[in-house]
Image (spheres, grey):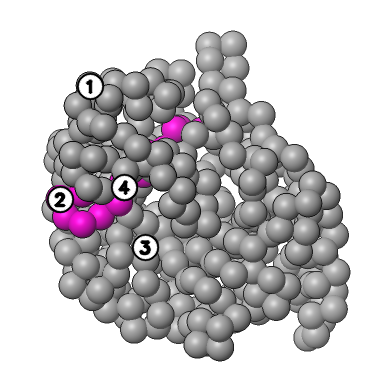
Amino acid sequence: MIDPFGRHVTYLRVSVTDRCDFRCVYCMAEDMTFLPKKDLLSLEELDRVCTAFIEKGVRKLRLTGGEPLVRKGIMTLVESLGRHLKSGALEELTLTTNGSQLAKYAPELAAHGVKRINVSVDTLDDAKFRQITRWGELAKVKDGIRAAQAAGLQIKINAVALKGVNDAEIPEMIRWTHGEGMDLTLIETMPLGDIDGDRTDQYLPLSMVRANLLDQFTLEDIPYKTGGPARYCQVKETGGRLGFITPMTHNFCESCNRVRLTCTGTLYMCLGQEDAADLRAPLRASEGNELLNAAIDEAIGRKPKGHDFVIDRRHNKPAVARHMSVTGG
């Protein structure tokens, strides 16, 4: 699949649920109204859409949420999609999780062919972790991480950089993740959906973070890639990798290889644009995939060149109305 700007679309992110057992302050409001379960694609329908994309050239598939591991029966989907790894049609099946359910599911994930996962951890301070996630317990997440490592999963920690919240902790986060054999990726907060707070108070440019890190660390840019938008460097003092995802200060649109499917079958061609395609209707209109394939082709033909994120006092409204939990980043 090639979009109008010559970019090959090889990476599909699939939000299997908009529900989550956390309420992270940069992602959603505390009192969220979630979709009725009847509106969601069934696990069989999710499998069918994913398979259609794989047949069209998708090589990396990431399950997201909400929190993907709270979707009832999720392991049956993971097991089913694992057949594409065995056939060689799919190079990687992975997921992004808050870690709360990992202790329960890590062995099954590994058994079904998942090799790497991303775990969201924004602070190592228990009280601050509860403040950011509202409902989360850091000890439970750490237990999950240990279970995942014991199962043989490689882990990358994702941390959203939040001004005045966790910015002073980032050096400690680097030492912790690298000391535990994990990569760390820092992410700029994005203007997605109405939240209870003011994003201008949260926003921290990673260009500033990187400059401050040079007081303690030697950072060497490296060509390492995982298929996503992160730019990586090697931290000489720890020997570990540090990634930067910068949708605000240095967007990655020129090399975008991704589209995002929601749990209701809506395909978003860009994280930062509202333009979308309904795949649920063609999926359910026929037992064959002709209509679905045509809808996918039409959507890829509308993939925009990029997004226009702004966070400042004059642009205090979200760039798009949907919350991060709809597409899982």
Dot placed on the residue nearer the N-terminal end, 4 or 3: 3
Q: Amino acid at mark 3?
A: Ile
229 and 313: which is toward the camera: 229
Which label was assigned to residue 241?
Answer: 4
Q: Which residue is mark 3?
A: 117
Neighbours of disc 4 within 10 Å: few (<14), some (14-19), many (20+): many
Q: Which residue is mark 2?
A: 179
Q: Tell me which segment is drawn in magenta.
A: 178-191
Question: What secondary structure is marked by label 3?
Answer: strand
Q: Please name the residue that numbered disc 1 is placed on.
A: 215
Q: Residue at x 50, y 63 (%)?
A: 62
CB atoms of marks 1 and 2 within 8 Å: no
Q: Residue at x 69, y 71 (%)?
A: 57
Instruction: Characterize the local packing of mark 1: few (<14), some (14-19) or many (20 or more) Cα atoms within 10 angstroms.
Output: few
Is residue 263 located in the magenta-colored stretch of the structure? Answer: no
Q: Amino acid at mark 2?
A: Gly
Please say if 317 is above or below 161.
Answer: above
- Find the distance from the CA under tag 3 to the CA under tag 2: 18 Å
Give the label, 4 or 3, closer to the camera. Answer: 4
Residue 268 percent coordinates (x, y): 68, 51
Mark 2–mark 4 distance (CA, rounded to whole Å): 11 Å
Per the model, the C-alpha gap separating discs 4 and 3 is: 15 Å
Q: Residues within 10 Å of mark 2 (few under 14, many from 20)?
A: few
Residue projecting furthest to the top: 314
x 85%, y 74%: residue:
291
Q: Is residue 185 magenta?
A: yes
